[in-house]
Every structure is written in C-alpha cells, then in structure tokens.
Amino acid sequence: MASENSFVQPAIPRFNGHYDHWSMLMENFLHSNEYWNLVENGITAAVGSSKSSEVQKKTLDELKLKDLKAKNYLFQAIDRSILETILKKDTAKDIWDSLKQKYQGTTCVKRAQLQALRKEFEVLHMKNGETVNDYFGRTLAIANRMRIHREKMDDVVIIEKILRSMISKFDYVVCSIEKSNDLDTLSIDEVQSSLLVHEQRISQHVTDE
C-alpha cells in the first residue's frame, strides 16, 4: 500500500510564450518545492572568505546547491532557443529576472493588450453554423486572457454576454434561462448544458423532417 505521505510530483510548467500565465504556474510550482524565496530574493548569504565562520560557509554551500536545483527546474521549463538569449545564468534569480524583463512587457503595452481584449469581448457574437461548444470555447478563451491581464471577469458577466449574443434560433431557450434562474448563482457549465440540449433538439427536429 502506498504511503500516506506519497504524492504525484506536479509537472514542471513549460514556457509557451504566454508569460503571465506561465509565471503564475511556475511560481506556484517553485513555492510547492520550497525554492521560491531563493528565486525571488537570490542567494543572500555572505560570500565565503577567511573571515567567514564555518556556519556561514555551510549555509552558503547549502544555498548554492538549492539554487542549482531551482535552476534545473527553470532550465527544464524553457526551450533552448529562449535560454540562449539570456545573457546571465549564474543563479535562478538571474534567469527569472531576465525572463520577466523580456516577456512581461511594460505597463503601457499590457494596458493596450487588455483594451484590445475588451473590445474583442464586446463585439463577440455567435456565428451562423457555429456550435454551442465552439462559441463557448471562443468566448471563454478571450475571458481567460482578460483574467490573466488582471481584469475582473465574474462568471455572470460571461453568462450574460453569451445569452445576449446567441443567434435567433436560441431565443426561446435564452428567455427560459433568464426567466427561470438567478444568473448570479448560475454556473457557466449549467448554461452551456441547457443550450446544448436545445441545440440537440433542433438538430433532431431537422433530421426528422
């Protein structure tokens, strides 16, 4: 029988170009392995010298070993092509700070990206021939990108957007959902399920004809 303390080691988050999302996952991963403080603050112990005590030297050696392990995690998370653009790789903090500087972007750029996402969300509407699942996928993808940019995006906002932007053949079920439920307590999955049932009925009706 497996030990009560055994657990599955979480996978190292791979950097895919979406820095904000990756850094959040990677920070959590490093926290869970007790390396984050070292990555965030660097090796702060005094450099060993003739005046350093044996305790200080031992602490520094331990920190260097721990830093090597943290660097190894970061190396595994980053493609070689990206790693080769980082000039200073002496410590885990050097690597982390370099990635942050390269990929996080300035406040101005991030604000512009969020504005573009807000506009994209505002004009969203279901296309003729698009399935319920496909439309939910498009909408949630934009909403999640907005959340990554620190936009407050409650589920009810997404639900209201979807309901008011469905094509006309869903008018009946949309009205039914709005009249029979408190949208503030309704989940996105529940709304999607109701619309999928209606979509299947429409499809079956067409087939029967």
Image (cartoon, rainbow, N blue to C red):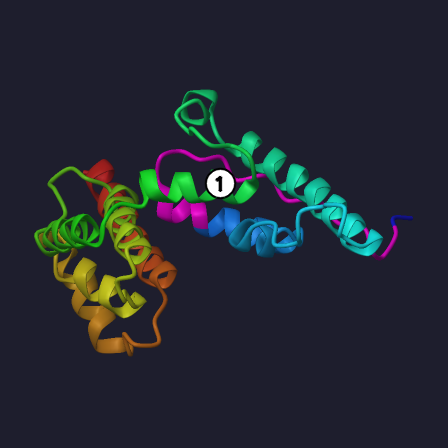
The residue that label 1 is drawn on is: 94
The residue segment tinted magenta is 3-23
Residue 142, given in percent of the width and then of the height, sits at 24, 49
Instruction: Name the residue: 24% across, 44% down.
Output: 138
- Between residues 20 and 95, which one lies in front from this camera angle? 95
The magenta stretch spans residue 10: yes
Instruction: Name the residue: 13% across, 60% down.
Output: 171
Q: Amino acid at mark 1?
A: Asp
State left or right for residue 121 relative to residue 62. Answer: left
Q: Is residue 62 above or below residue 86?
A: below
Q: Main secondary structure of the magenta part?
A: loop
State left or right for residue 111 relative to residue 189. Answer: left
- Between residues 182 and 143, which one lies in front from this camera angle? 143
Q: Secondary structure at mark 1?
A: helix
Instruction: Name the residue: 24% across, 36% down.
Output: 207
State left or right for residue 184 relative to residue 67. Answer: left
